[in-house]
Amino acid sequence: MATTQTFPPVDQRHQKPLGSIEVPPRILLGPGPSNAHPDVLKALSLPPVGHLDPFYVDLMSEVQELLRYAWQTDNRLTLPMSGTGSAAMEATLANSVEPGDKVLVAIKGYFGYRLADMADRYRAEVVTIEKDWGQAFSLKELEAALSKYKPAILAMVHAETSTGVCQPMEGVGELCKKYDCLLLLDTVTSLGGVPLFLDAWGVDLAYSCSQKGLSCPPGLGPFTMSPRAEAKLNKRAGKVNNWYLDVSLLNKYWGSDRVYHHTAPVNMNFGMREALRLLADEGLENSWERHKKNAERLWSGLEGIGLELHVEKDLRLPTLTTVRIPEGIDGKAFTLHLLKNHGIEIGGGLGTLAGKVWRIGLMGYNSTSENVDLILNLLDKELPRFRDNSACAA
Amino acid sequence: MATTQTFPPVDQRHQKPLGSIEVPPRILLGPGPSNAHPDVLKALSLPPVGHLDPFYVDLMSEVQELLRYAWQTDNRLTLPMSGTGSAAMEATLANSVEPGDKVLVAIKGYFGYRLADMADRYRAEVVTIEKDWGQAFSLKELEAALSKYKPAILAMVHAETSTGVCQPMEGVGELCKKYDCLLLLDTVTSLGGVPLFLDAWGVDLAYSCSQKGLSCPPGLGPFTMSPRAEAKLNKRAGKVNNWYLDVSLLNKYWGSDRVYHHTAPVNMNFGMREALRLLADEGLENSWERHKKNAERLWSGLEGIGLELHVEKDLRLPTLTTVRIPEGIDGKAFTLHLLKNHGIEIGGGLGTLAGKVWRIGLMGYNSTSENVDLILNLLDKELPRFRDNSACAA
């Protein structure tokens, strides 16, 4: 058959010589990632085990159960997708949209557009309604659109990371049931830090990330699906148009069968287990209260030094605050200065808010009064200097 | 606008009380994951930085350059997908297949079928040729199929993890050029451990994983794409039917623009950077030679204790060996015994080889003569006892 193979010489051009990795210390007060809890980082560095090891199979169940707690849902199909939050976002659409399904996306920021783009790739008939970046939808606006379009799915964002707005959810699930459509919700910047009641709210599909309210590094995308959404998946005509994110396959690994699907990112799941364990130890109510208290301290401090908040108080996210960049300040140069000279990351604006706002995150492990005071003091001290262009050497 | 929201009480049923994570020690000598290098684990536990931090942007370039070295390619579009090897596998198809394209899959094991399933989901016209599990394709067989089907893409597996076969690649790329089709290659179980020369072999699309020859935990999927494959992507009529894996979007983040796409799994990339740095320090030729030497030690040891190897010598992978399970032994009970009582994982068979073979991996950090002797001694000592059913209490 085969004879011994011969090979060309190895090309050394890309053999870049490097020393051991050295990571600069950062306090991450932007839109995410946030700093991870030290126990989570320790868990990440534990030696891996096999993805079908009985120990790991038990750990999977722990992660699932604690995700149900964090999201306040009984959904059987609750699991972290083996990718970042955007993968879990795509999973909610890939598993619910059949070609030709009408999907209504309620857009009030950057991530609403992403939902629309993704739904389009799964051949949905996408219709949209829009609000200004910094506002939320009223029940009346949502009902008008549901009644007009009669979609199979309403997709919207609970915590819009681009604007800092928290969409009130009371009554939305009832509307979706009335108009016989599934409710799909982005909870990327709310899980762990903002009150979330998926079952009470009638949410059918939701996704989140690991690197914000859960105090874990980025790399996993929590996903959940209600029995109603599962029923739609079970009666679809063709295969899900995505193998990696196909829940009908993943269910065999995460469900009772534990049949191999893909090699799980075991170390990331060690970290996720610890992150969820720490959240359960603190208790949801305590975590939500802590985020609220620190956000309020930040808001009054920002106003105290003369800065303007972009979102009205009742709609503000406790996890992420948008602050208007004062006249005469180069927002991007200032964030670079904070990062390079103080090791502190805050975010710039996205989309229509680019250049207009900064985004300050207080999420999970980083939602502390010390961090609030740190960023307030820095803004207070550095902004005036920066306004004179004296600190532009960043 | 919004009034203060009210929430239901928190349901505590899923608030599972747990202690800190404790992971049992394992030596992973199965089909993967393999144990990770201690320096890689240390890197994983470093505090995260932002995905647009100048430090991280530099690290991305290091990872890309060292991946080019490991794969022996100059491809500009060389990057780790933010998912496991299966995500990178899907990325090669999602970015190359347009609906109606003919894709020829050369199947000689489990992962060939997976390629066919994935290609089907991107609406390819899938045609297949098959070989018995344990064999490889000859150039004559490949040319006959290329000439018969005239596909747009030939997809095949270099290192078939389900059988332990290494497909000889000499001449395949020339055939693909002759028949004007792209060559897509699975290198999941070869990268880092088995000679691989993507450019010299004329490979247009390839994918791999982090958890085998690279000594990193699972979670990232190296991906690469030649200028020929890039040209096909650039002239496609519609969007890629997968947002998360769309290289035309990812290119803006990994290319010179560094525009936000998704929040990168930064800690996994810290680990990947260290894993690739360690491979470059050792040198590809040395790593390949080490894998070969330890595999040969394993093969002669296995034959020395009377076990039969499933694949003929010239086609064997140095990273993964398939051993026939002797008559009278319950293969699955034996692997469970090794895991539970000795902390050692070896793999069972997949698909048509289920119950017929064990799969012993010697990959990356785990390819050592000590591990070879450990598993040989265990098999020598435990198999006879197990044959008498005296050790079945696993």
Image: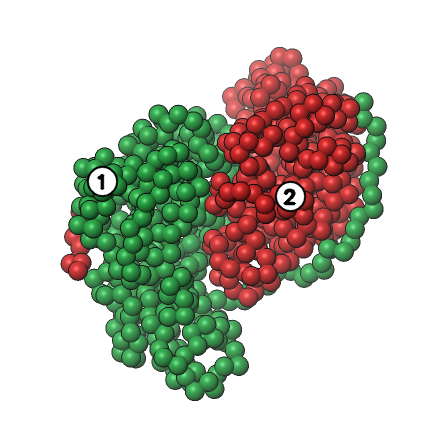
Chain colours: A green, B red
Q: Is residue B356 visible?
A: yes
Amino acid identity at mark 1: Cys
x and y percentages locating residue B212 in the rendered image: 63, 40
Is residue A143 placed above or below B30 in the rendered structure?
below
Q: Nearer the viewer, mark 1 or mark 2?
A: 2
Discs 1, 2: same chain: no
Is residue B225 placed above or below A309 in the rendered structure?
above
Q: Alpha-carbon distance for marks 1 and 2? A: 44 Å
x and y percentages locating residue A338 in the rendered image: 46, 74
- Tell me the SS state at disc 2: helix
What residue sits 57% from the left and 55% below the top? Answer: B254
Left or right of residue A307, residue B139 in this image: right
What residue sits 53% from the left and 81% below the top? Answer: A393
Amino acid identity at mark 2: Ala
x and y percentages locating residue B394 in the rendered image: 52, 24
Left or right of residue B165, residue A168 in this image: left
Front in this rendered view, residue B354 or B221? B221
What residue sits 20% from the left and 46% below the top? Answer: A144
Question: Any mark on residue B229, and which?
Answer: 2
Is residue B112 placed above or below B330 in the rendered structure?
below
- Tell me the SS state at disc 1: helix
Q: Mark 1 points at which residue?
A: A176
Front in this rendered view, residue A339 or A41? A339
**Which of the image's four quarters has the N terminus of chain B?**
bottom left
Q: Which chain carries label 2?
A: B
